[in-house]
Every structure is written in structure tokens, then in C-alpha cells.
Image (spheres, helix red, strand yellow):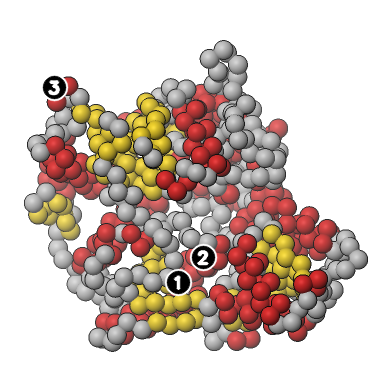
């Protein structure tokens, strides 16, 4: 989105892009050279005509103008300028909590007392929102419903702000979610929210409880899990307690975490304030000095270079737009200079012009391959592929001689640490080449608009890159043929309408009559009951194609409830991506792509490119288990 001005707000930098809106840094020129930095959140133009997205944006706007608390981001204006609908909010000089956690865990620098302080401040902001009243004194019963590390922001001076009330629910809000529909990030939602049941403030309490669990454990609660496995454990209440993962955890803190994450809402803290008071009691006993200063020092130390670069970018953009130097930080440029001097003394950077760069160039490496993706895969098939590939890379089972590393969460923001790492790899040729997975955001990155390291695009063409394609059409064709070998009354289940249409077209082309085919649009929530009902009828299917492995667990549960045994009473074929461990879904046959084969194809194309070969393309076929070129491992337990 190319925007230079929205109303009185002059755009100077893109901070981030999401599925609903883009977020820009802007400056509002004032009298006598007094200028203010603000954030402008623009609803994407193509979504302005979508009633659901527009209602989400307007609900956020309605709530945001009423929220005024130290731990909630402040909104100053809601407006329409031409085709643009926007919010103007505080500019927060800091990092979202998920960046803080990722950087701290990566450097083994996590401080639990600082994290607990951040959660206590988060709960203070949530309690304020939960108890918000309308202008006539009526309680609004606001529930954020999307509390996660992505929506908690920590500034370099130690402030903590809850952000993004885009799917928050308030009493009487227009366009409220229909019963049975789920919104939010699955890893952090309460069980009652995952099933689409009515929620209250205790759903947000659960989300902060998950965040506390992850801070204590030093890892994600749902690391490497498919959505179906995650959902199954969440709904059954079988997720590990924190003592099972960290046996020496402080007993008081473990009790607090267990209560916040109680499966039944009635067993949790009754309010965010009660949860906050419990955390304050823990801090008073163990870390009485853990306050805003300690939080700010911790975050600032993790992101010194990013902070310096952002200050320089802001000043450079202001000079370009205004024709003169305008320093919105007062003596910010002097402060940036001092920070740069400190980095130079440490030998971390050198300065060329206004830009800090690594102090010593790195030697080119031809034994390292970097796999790159954003956090927003473009389709259901790709989300499954990404999860499996990350697991393979983490376990070093790629089959590639040399190092394979992953950059996850890359976007075009100046302060995005993964994007900065990508730019550094390109600038210093510290890898043999790059593999990019299907994601629209990646194809707009400035660093990729010109030739550089050998590149491979997986799934869709990218300028200056070879192409590895996954034969999804072939997967549907091979699955259809296998289904018809096993029966002539076929059911196809998927949450993705194009998959259903493709399967129907292929099966009918192979001779299956329309009255012998049942296509069912299904999501993990509700799929179990849908499967049970499918077999509570006279004409039961004798073969089922589960086109998404997130549905495997609820489909098998539905079959069990109907008294039907997979592999014996009905043939079940599921799309998965190898190498899923053996034992995943007893009685289920799988077909999918071997991500090891995809990675090796990418490696071969990178090597060919480096040797001066033309930019070829490679088509990776789907495979059944018996066709795999490498053995599978048996079912494994996650790493502690």
C-alpha cells in the first residue's frame, strides 16, 4: 500500500501489515515546529466492502475511543479520508511481546521476574477494559478475545500496553459473533472460546495464564503441534501442567499458573484484577524491585541496534518530507549517536554515513541454506506444510549435507528482527542460498526486488528465483483414484472450499455419480459431531477423504462415537505432509508431500544457480507412505 498522507497525518514509515489493516508511523506537524509522532492504522481498501471485516474494524474503533488507561494503547481519532478508514493511535517506541520472548529465548536471556511484571501490567489493562462502562453507566462487559504476545506491547522505557481490540466483544456491539463461531489465536484461547460458547473476562484470564506458562517453561505450550492436536488437548483439558515441564518451578507461581489455566472457567481467577493481585504477591516475595525500569532496561538491551536504526530512519524520512531536520525525540539524534558509540566500542557495529553495519564482513558460506517464511501462510495447505517443515529443520532431519536454518516471521518492517537478519544474510553472503515459502508478504520485500543470493521460491514464482512447485492437483487426482479403488460411496471433508470443488470435479471425471458423492465443508470445531451424523444414516460412505490433517483427530472421534472403526468399517485417507511420525491416526492412510524432498529440491536448484546453470523449475509429486524415499520415524514425544 503506497500512502503518503491520510488527513493531517504524514506517513513516514510502514510498521507492520496484518490480515485486516496496515500500520504506519506518521507525523503531525504542529505550530512553532512542534511535531508529534502517531501511529495510523488503515483498513485495507479491498476489505472496506467486506461487511465482516468492516464491522470488526468499526467495533475496534468504537471501543478504542472509550479506552483511556495507562496499560491500553491510546486512540486519538477515528476517521474516513477518501477511500481510507483509519485509527490514529499513540506511537509506542518498543517491541511486541512475542518479539521480546523470541529474542530472549534465542539468546537464553529470559528473566522471569520481568515477564511476571509485564503480565501484571497486562492484567491491569485488561481489568480496566473488562469493567468499562458506557456513558450512561451501563457495564459494557468487554472481552478482548485475542490476548496473546502479539497483542501486548512493551516500550523501551518499561510501559506495557494491550493493543488490537479488533475482535473484542462488548455487550450490545453490532455484528457480534454468532454462536458456534470461533475467533482468536488457537494457542491462547480458552476451551469455552474454542467451542464457540459465550465467554466472559475469564477467557482473557486463561490467555494470560498460557503466556505465563510459556514464560516459565521458556518455550511455546503448543510447539510443533497441529491445530487438531492442540484443539483436542485444549478441549479435553489434558495439556501439561507447568510442574510437569519445569519440576523446580516456584510452588506459589505454579499454583497461580494452574489456576489461571483451569479447564473450567469457574475454577479460574474470577477477574483479571484477582489474577494481577496474585502475581503482585509473588513479586513482592521474590522480586520486589521488578518494575518499569527493570522491564525497560531488559527490553532495551535486547533491541539496542533496532532502536538506533529506527531513530535514524525517522529522522531521515522527516528530512526528506519536510526539507529540514526535525527530531521528534528532542535530543534523540544525540542519544542515537551515544548508543552507536557504545556499539562501536563493543565491536558490534561500524557506522557508514548514518547506518550501523556489522563491524567485520563475514566470509561467504556455501554449506548453509536458509528457509524463509512470514507468519501468514496463504492457505490451509501451506499452514500444514510450514508446520511440518519447521519440525524437520528443528530435528535436523532434512537430508541435506550442511546447515539448514529457518527465518520465521519475516516482514518488511524496519524494526522486524527476522527481516534484518535476512538483509544481513543477503548483504554478507552468509548462506549458499535462500528458500522462500508461498506467502504474499514475502514477495513484496524490498531486499528481494533485485538479484542477490541464489533463491528458490516454493509454491509460487518470485523474481530472480528458481521455482519448486508442489503438485496439489496431482494430490487430489491420486487421492481420488485411491478412494475409488476402495469403494463407490465417497465422502470428502475439508475446511477449504476450493479443495472440495477440485475433489468433486476429479471424482466425477473418474466416473463417480453425483449421488454417490458427499462433500462436506468442515472445520476442526464441530467436525466430530458432523462425522457422527454422517454415519447415522442409511447410505453410509465406505470411503472418506480428509483433505486436511487438522480434521483427522475429530473425524476419528466422530467415527468412534458412531461405533465405526477406521480401516475396518470405512476406508479413511488423509492429506498430511511427511514425515509425520508413524502412529498418527490408527486405521488412516496418508498421502502428501515429503518436505525433505522439497528441501532437497530447493538445495539442488540453489547449487545449480550458484554454478551458473539457468533457473529451472522442479515439480514435487505427492506420495503415499510406500513411495517415500526415506524411512519414517515412529511416534515421538515432543522435546521437553
Q: In this view, does 210 lie to the left or right of 414?
A: right
Toward which corner of the image does residue 319 lie, by quadrant? top left
Q: Residue 459 carries which label?
A: 1
Q: Residue 32 carries which label?
A: 3
Foreground residue, 49 or 328?
49
Task: Give the Cα distance between marks 2 and 3.
Answer: 53 Å
At label 1, counting other C-alpha atoms closer than 10 Å, the crowd grade (few under 14, some 14-19, many 20 or more) is: some
Residue 118 is at least partly visible in this image: no
Q: Earlier in the sequence, mark 1 or mark 3?
A: 3
Residue 619 is at least partly visible in this image: yes
- Residue in the picture at 47% in, 42% down: 48
Residue extending farthest to the right is 538
Q: In this view, does 512 lie to the left or right of 252?
A: right
* Residue 418 to residue 372: above or below: above
* Camera-nearest label, 2 or 3: 3
Disc 2: which residue: 382
Amino acid at each position: 500500500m503506497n500512502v503518503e498522507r491520510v488527513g493531517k497525518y504524514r506517513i513516514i514509515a510502514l510498521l507492520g501489515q496484518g490480515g485486516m489493516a496496515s500500520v504506519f508511523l506518521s507525523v503531525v506537524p504542529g505550530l512553532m515546529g512542534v511535531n508529534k509522532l502517531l501511529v495510523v492504522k488503515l483498513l485495507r481498501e479491498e476489505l472496506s466492502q467486506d461487511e465482516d471485516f468492516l464491522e470488526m474494524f468499526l467495533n475496534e474503533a468504537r471501543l478504542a475511543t472509550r479506552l483511556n488507561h495507562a496499560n491500553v494503547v491510546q486512540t486519538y481519532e477515528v476517521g474516513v479520508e477518501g477511500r481510507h478508514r483509519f485509527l490514529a493511535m499513540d506511537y509506542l517506541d518498543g517491541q511486541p511481546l512475542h518479539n521480546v520472548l523470541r529474542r530472549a529465548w534465542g539468546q537464553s536471556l529470559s528473566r522471569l521476574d520481568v515477564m511476571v511484571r509485564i503480565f501484571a501490567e497486562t492484567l491491569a489493562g485488561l481489568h480496566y477494559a473488562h469493567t468499562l462502562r458506557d456513558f450512561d453507566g451501563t457495564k459494557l462487559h468487554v472481552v478482548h478475545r485475542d490476548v496473546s504476545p502479539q497483542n501486548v506491547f512493551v516500550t523501551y522505557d518499561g510501559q506495557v500496553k494491550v493493543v488490537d481490540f479488533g475482535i473484542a466483544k462488548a455487550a450490545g456491539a453490532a455484528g457480534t459473533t454468532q454462536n458456534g463461531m470461533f475467533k482468536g489465536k488457537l494457542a491462547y484461547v480458552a476451551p469455552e472460546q474454542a467451542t464457540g460458547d459465550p465467554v466472559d473476562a475469564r477467557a482473557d484470564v486463561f490467555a494470560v495464564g498460557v503466556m505465563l506458562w510459556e514464560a516459565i517453561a521458556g518455550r511455546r505450550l503448543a510447539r510443533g503441534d497441529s491445530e487438531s492436536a492442540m484443539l483436542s488437548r485444549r478441549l479435553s483439558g489434558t495439556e501439561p501442567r507447568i510442574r510437569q515441564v519445569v519440576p523446580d518451578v516456584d510452588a506459589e507461581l505454579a499454583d497461580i499458573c494452574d489456576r489461571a489455566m483451569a479447564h473450567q472457567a469457574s475454577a479460574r481467577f474470577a477477574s483479571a484484577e484477582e489474577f494481577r493481585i496474585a502475581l503482585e504477591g509473588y513479586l513482592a516475595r521474590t522480586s520486589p524491585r521488578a518494575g518499569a525500569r527493570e522491564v525497560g532496561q531488559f527490553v532495551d538491551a535486547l533491541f539496542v541496534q533496532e532502536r538506533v536504526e529506527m531513530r535514524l530512519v525517522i529522522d531521515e524520512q522527516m528530512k526528506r518530507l519536510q526539507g529540514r531536520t526535525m527530531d521528534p525525540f528532542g535530543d534523540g539524534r544525540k542519544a542515537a549517536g551515544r548508543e552507536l558509540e557504545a556499539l562501536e566500542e563493543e565491536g558490534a557495529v561500524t557506522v557508514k554515513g548514518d547506518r550501523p553495519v556489522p563491524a567485520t564482513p563475514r566470509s561467504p558460506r556455501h554449506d548453509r541454506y536458509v528457509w524463509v517464511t512470514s507468519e501468514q501462510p496463504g492457505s490451509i495447505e501451506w499452514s500444514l506444510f510450514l508446520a511440518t517443515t519447521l519440525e524437520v529443520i528443528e530435528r535436523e532431519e532434512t537430508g541435506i549435507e550442511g546447515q539448514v536454518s529457518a527465518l520465521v516471521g519475516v516482514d518488511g518492517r524496519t524494526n522486524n528482527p527476522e527481516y534484518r537478519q535476512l538483509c544481513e544474510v543477503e548483504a554478507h553472503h552468509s548462506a549458499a542460498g535462500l528458500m522462500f515459502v508461498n506467502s504474499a508478504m514475502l514477495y513484496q520485500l524490498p531486499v528481494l526486488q533485485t538479484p542477490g543470493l541464489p533463491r528458490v521460491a516454493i509454491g509460487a514464482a518470485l523474481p530472480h528465483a528458481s521455482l519448486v512447485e508442489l503438485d496439489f492437483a496431482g494430490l487430489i487426482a491420486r487421492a481420488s483414484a485411491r478412494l475409488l479403488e476402495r469403494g463407490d460411496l465417497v465422502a470428502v471433508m475439508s475446511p477449504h472450499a476450493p479443495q472440495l470443488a477440485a475433489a468433486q470435479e476429479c471424482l466425477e471425471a473418474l466416473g463417480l455419480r453425483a449421488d454417490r458423492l458427499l462433500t462436506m465443508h468442515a472445520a476442526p470445531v464441530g467436525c466430530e459431531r458432523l462425522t457422527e451424523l454422517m454415519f447415522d444414516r442409511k447410505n453410509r460412505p465406505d470411503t472418506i477423504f480428509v483433505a486436511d490433517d487438522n480434521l483427522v483427530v475429530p473425524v476419528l472421534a466422530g467415527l468412534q462415537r458412531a461405533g465405526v472403526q477406521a480401516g475396518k468399517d470405512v476406508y479413511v485417507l488423509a492429506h498430511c505432509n511427511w514425515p509425520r511420525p508413524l502412529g498418527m491416526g490408527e486405521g488412516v492412510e496418508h498421502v502428501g508431500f515429503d518436505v525433505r524432498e522439497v528441501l532437497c529440491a530447493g538445495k539442488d536448484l540453489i547449487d545449480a544457480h550458484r554454478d551458473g546453470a539457468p533457473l529451472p523449475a522442479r515439480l514435487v509429486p505427492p506420495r503415499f507412505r510406500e513411495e517415500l524415499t526415506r524411512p519414517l520415524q515412529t511416534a515421538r514425544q515432543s522435546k521437553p
